Amino acid sequence: MKNLLLLLVILLSFTLNAEQEKLTIGLSVWSGYPESVRGFKDALAEGGFIEGTNIEFLHRNALSNKESQQKIAAEFFRRNVDMVYSLTTPGTIIIKDALSEQTPIVFSIVTYPADSGLIEAFDYSGNNLVGTSNFVPLHNYIDLLTSVLPEAKTIAIFHRKGEPNSKIQASNLIRLFKKKGIKVIDIEPQSINETVKLAENIVNSVDAFVTTTDTLMQNGAERALIELSNQHNIPILSSNKKGIEQGATFGPVADFYTLGKMSGKMAVQILKGEATPHTLESKYQKPPTFLINKSRFNKLDLRFSTPIDGVVYVE
């Protein structure tokens, strides 16, 4: 009887210790991105961190609202999470400002993490952040557009006003397109309705629309541009995989699942004590995926004038 009681006490002790040792990760997804979260969780599981066993997640969605994100960040701080997985530039800026510098923050879908001030550089963050960028080297956009539309003279670039990552992307694209002799109309909407109105004003004056990686494009504005492009047979050079799947014509894109898994592998190293954020390098996907919407591409009767490696078609 005494031995049985002793065994029960030991088992209870192990159970309590297991519960105490369970790590908590805050998932700050900003506006969703389920593929990114799936990639992150898959990498953690492969590294031995199993949801419900030795790790738990606080999954929070701010729905692109800054006040909601501030409340989420405050909750993570109050609950003293062991790590935060944070998505997008605006979402991660809020998380960084609210949390302790001792809390590791692993990010993804941040196009320009250094230029936006989240880290010092890709090879050395200089703080408690590290992660993956959805940056695609911009020559890929130029190469793809000029291969498919070699006679293009004028394009319109759409990016949300006031969002730093897409502003940087748009500025650099404008510079590179101008070097190719292509005129650029810079469009900076703040809402989906404004995106449509501004696009309608120039739809007959451009050879293509170009979308950036910002949250406005990813959350409805690009879908609205797709409807307009279908009406007027305007190709869309997109920065977003989801946009191309929904009907944008083509684009060099970063795959969010791949990036999430890359970030998850960094998180595993940190959680195991093998590294800290500032000893790891932030990364982007190499090479990008050249994604083509097959039905839109064919409907517009487009062809490649020069070959492009790494082309993937979606229906």
Image (cartoon, rainbow, N blue to C red):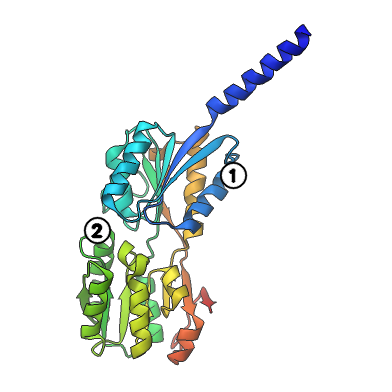
Q: Quadrant of residue 47?
A: top right
Relative to 271, does residue 113 appear above or below in the rendering? Answer: below
Residue 212 seen in render: yes
Q: Quadrant of residue 278?
A: top left
Q: Given the image, on which type of amino acid does mark 1 rest?
A: Ala
Question: Marks 1 and 2, how far apart in space?
Answer: 33 Å
Place of residue 272 in the rendered image (x, y in percent of width and height, measured from the top left): 53, 34
Q: Residues within 10 Å of mark 2 (few under 14, many from 20)?
A: some
Q: Given the image, on which type of amino acid does mark 2 rest?
A: Pro
Which quadrant of the rendered structure holds the N terminus?
top right
Place of residue 84 in the rendered image (x, y in percent of width and height, measured from the top left): 41, 41
Q: Is residue 292 left or right of residue 191?
A: right
Residue drawn at (43%, 38%) of the image = 83
Relative to 194, does residue 294 appear above or below in the rendering? Answer: below
Q: Which residue is mark 1?
A: 45
Q: Residues within 10 Å of mark 1 (few under 14, many from 20)?
A: some
Whichever of labels 1 and 2 marks the residue nearer the N terminus, that label is 1
Residue drawn at (47%, 49%) of the image = 263
Residue farthest bottom in this picture: 301
Q: Which residue is mark 2?
A: 164
Which secondary structure lies at badge 2?
A: helix
